[in-house]
Image (cartoon, helix red, strand yellow):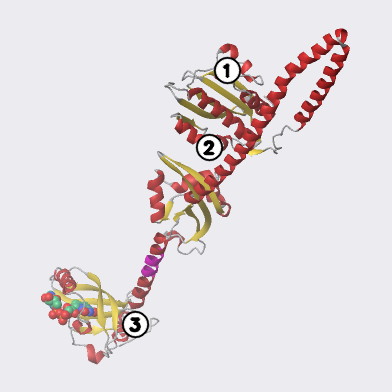
Amino acid sequence: MSTVSPARRPSSLPAGTLPTEAFRAAVDQADIAISITDPQANILFANEAFMRITGYAPAEIIGRNESVLSNHTTPKALYRTMWTALAGQRPWSGRLLNRRKDGVLYLADLTITPLVDARGVTTHYLGMHRDVTELHRLGRVTRNQKKLIESVVDAAPAAFALLDQSGRVILDNQEYKKLVSDLGSREPAHRLLDALHPDWRRLLAEAPAQCAFPHREQRIERPGGRARWLSATASVVDMQSDCVDSYFCAGGQPGLLLMVSDISDLRVEQERARIEARKAVLAEEERTAAIREGLSAALFRLGEPMNMMASAVTVLQRRDPLSARVLEDALRAAGAHLESLRLVIPQSPQELPVGINVNEILRDVLEISTPRLLAAGIVVDWQPAPTLPALPGRPVQLSMLFKALLDNAIEAMNVKGWRRRELLVQSTAGDERIAVRIADSGPGIPEEWRNKAFEPFFTMKNGGQHIGTGLSRAQQVVSDHGGIIDLDHSPSGGCAVVVEFRVDGDPI
Ligand code: FAD
């Protein structure tokens, strides 16, 4: 092979013309295997890189057919396509399996260009090929790794979604796809992030690191199905851009990787345990309240004969002072006994106010009352406000309050022969207030009894047999929370109890 010095130029050539030797040297020294053949693919010329890649010496290769390089495992159809293109004087490119002189196989990326003379006849073929074995191996390794990662990610019991800086989901797995269909929402990642980190869109664009958070749980309502509890972890990942304009930039683009696991079963279990605990607390509190009310009612009613006896003492003092004194002593002893009885009336436990989600309390109370509601054949229309601010309150007291209102509604409708049995439980928020409406389709409370209904020991049930402290106790709890309670007509014909609280806990 000949070489030329680029600095030397024959003086006969005009300035700007490349000498023929330079062409020859360029082809000889190019770092790509170049061969020129006759129309039958017999090699007439091969450069240094060709010798290096194939392992043949010039004397061994010149005059031989290019097929000497074939390993004879490249599909025949591929050669047919090659030769069809060449016969049509079109260049052809493809990948072939070649064999070096020493028997080692290599993959060649080959381009063949037909050289056509002035008469339009193919006189030669120009072949250029590169050993791409290592490139192919790396490509395969990368593809295999990608497949492995994809199958691991797809087999993972958690859902993954990778979001780019504009919030677009650019990668996900099978579990995430299941989530899309289960929740009936186009992009569950957005729904979760909106709920868990409302400012995520702005932060992802401006300060991605602030979008990360570990294990946050969110309840997601599903249209016509059981709500799901999801636990999400967001982490920021550095991604390399695939745009050409970032080829020379070292830095990548941040992306947000969201990992979501379904903890519904766990939460259902926890909820069940919580409801059971609340049920036990309410049952205990109800028992205590019943004792308290029974004793208070007894003391209240004993007041009447005591007063009569006191009047009798006054009358007797003039006519029969001795009997009057005996009666007076008895009265004093009875008074002392009543007083000691008053002292043992159990008080409700002191609760510290905490931030309360009224929807949660109502949901719990409905859950606890479900067996009674089902047994009474009552259809419940539960309309919670989509979001409620926290109310500073005492959870047990408020649960007792709503349970008592619900019990009243159930009792009002659960009467033999009563047909319409509908219960509306609704919470609304607005104007710094939270309102709860419990409306039944029972017989309702007559207008004239509306105010009396809140008096202690008033009842209109069972011809006055019932102790009837429910509403007065409810009013006590409401006013302890600075709220108001009122009775109204229910659109379904019965009674509607409306309870309102200020969000800051101040009295209304
Ligand atoms: P072959 O008998 O050579 O041919 C197989 C098929 O190709 C047959 O169906 C036949 O009809 C058709 N065919 C063969 N020669 C011609 C022709 N001259 N005109 C029209 N059709 C024809 N092959 C490699 O395996 N590795 C290479 O690196 C390689 N480099 C090449 C570089 C150039 C510039 C050219 C022109 C060809 C090159 N070839 C290469 C193709 C090679 O010439 C053989 O066609 C191929 O190796 C198949 O060889 P074979 O002995 O299996 O079959």
Mark 1 to mark 2 CA distance (whole Å): 26 Å
| Earlier-in-chain disc, 1 versus 3 | 3
Which residues are drawn in magenta? 142-149
* Disc nearer the start of the sequence (1/2): 2
**Residue 40 appearing in the image:** no
Q: Quadrant of ligand 1?
A: bottom left
Query: On the image, which quarter does residue 76 sit in?
Result: bottom left
Does the beta carbon of the residue at mark 1 sit less than 8 Å from ligand 1? Answer: no
Looking at the rendered structure, the number of numbered marks drawn on it comes to 3
Residue at numbered disc 3:
29
Q: Residues within 10 Å of mark 1 (few under 14, many from 20)?
A: few
- Amino acid found under the numbered disc labelled 2: Ile
Q: Secondary structure at mark 1?
A: loop
- Name the residue carrying label 1: 460
348, 109: nearer the viewer: 348
- Relative to 14, 343 lies left or right: right
For residue 368, which numbered disc appears in the image? 2
Going 64% across and 20% down the picture, which residue do you hit?
A: 454
